[in-house]
Amino acid sequence: EKLNATGPMNIARLARKINAKLIHISTDYVFNGKGSEPYTEDMLKEPLGVYGKTKAQGEEEIQKEMNQYYILRTAWLYGFDGKNFVYTMTKLMNSHDSIKVVNDQFGTPTCAVDLAETIIKIIHKSNNAKSFFGKNSALSYGIYHFTDEGQTNWHEFAAEIYRLGKKYGRITQDCAVNPCSTEEYGAKVQRPAYSVLSKEKITKSMKIKIPAWQVSLEKFIKNERFNPM
């Protein structure tokens, strides 16, 4: 709660005092995952667990404190530094003959590089409020969704990691990637079964093209910075 709710509230309070703009990263976990169509920014928040509830609270605290904010909800994030699903799967596939991965939770893998590039574009667009023709071209404040394009489940994601890992020499042994249900896997924390986010608002507002998750995953795995320590 201190990290996900109180912290953003304090940052927003200070940002308002010094007239700064705020970009805040939120999550697909603010939704309950019971839908079947991509979630839009204005859909009802109904988080399942403590993480989602405190992230939703953080969004609300920012909205109470200030008006000059961009809240970016993202999902299934992985990057070059720190722990993530791609690195975990790569290490498991290099040390096990077979693994089980759930196939009944759907979402969109997102490379942190793509998210970072979009954040930079938001900053540039926000700082250059007037276009060549004098019209206000600043991005409207509010909540936006950003992930890579497409949707998949964790098992299909893992299978693609294995295929690309073998292709680029990141995985050096054979490993069977077997599907299983969430119930069979026995996860202690309830996670959304469906958390695909609609990107229609951000693509129209910023006129950007978002890469397919498979394309970004391949770029990530073959990059020299790839290092699943």
Image (spheres, grey):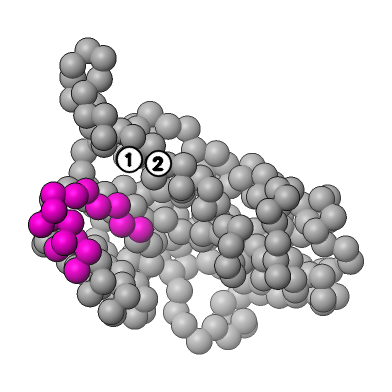
Q: Secondary structure at mark 1?
A: helix
Q: Amino acid at mark 1?
A: Ile
Q: Is residue 89 above or below residue 215?
A: below
Q: Secondary structure at mark 2?
A: helix
Residue 50 place in picture, x, y as percent: 34, 80
Nearer-the-camera pick, 164 or 36: 164
Label number found at residue 214: none
Nearer-the-camera pick, 114 or 19: 19
Position of the C terminus, as image quadrant, is bottom right
Label number found at residue 123: 1
The answer to if 11 sits in the magenta stretch is yes
Label number found at residue 120: 2
Q: Amino acid at mark 2?
A: Ile
Q: Mark 1, residues whose alpha carbon is within 10 Å: few (<14), some, or many (≥20)?
A: some
Range of residues picked out in magenta: 10-25
Q: Mark 2, residues whose alpha carbon is within 10 Å: few (<14), some, or many (≥20)?
A: few
The answer to if 100 sits in the magenta stretch is no
Residue 74, located in which quarter of the rendered image?
bottom left
Nearer-the-camera pick, 102 or 36: 102
Task: Specify whether residue 4 is in view.
Answer: yes
Residue at image location 62% in from the left, 82% down from the top: 184
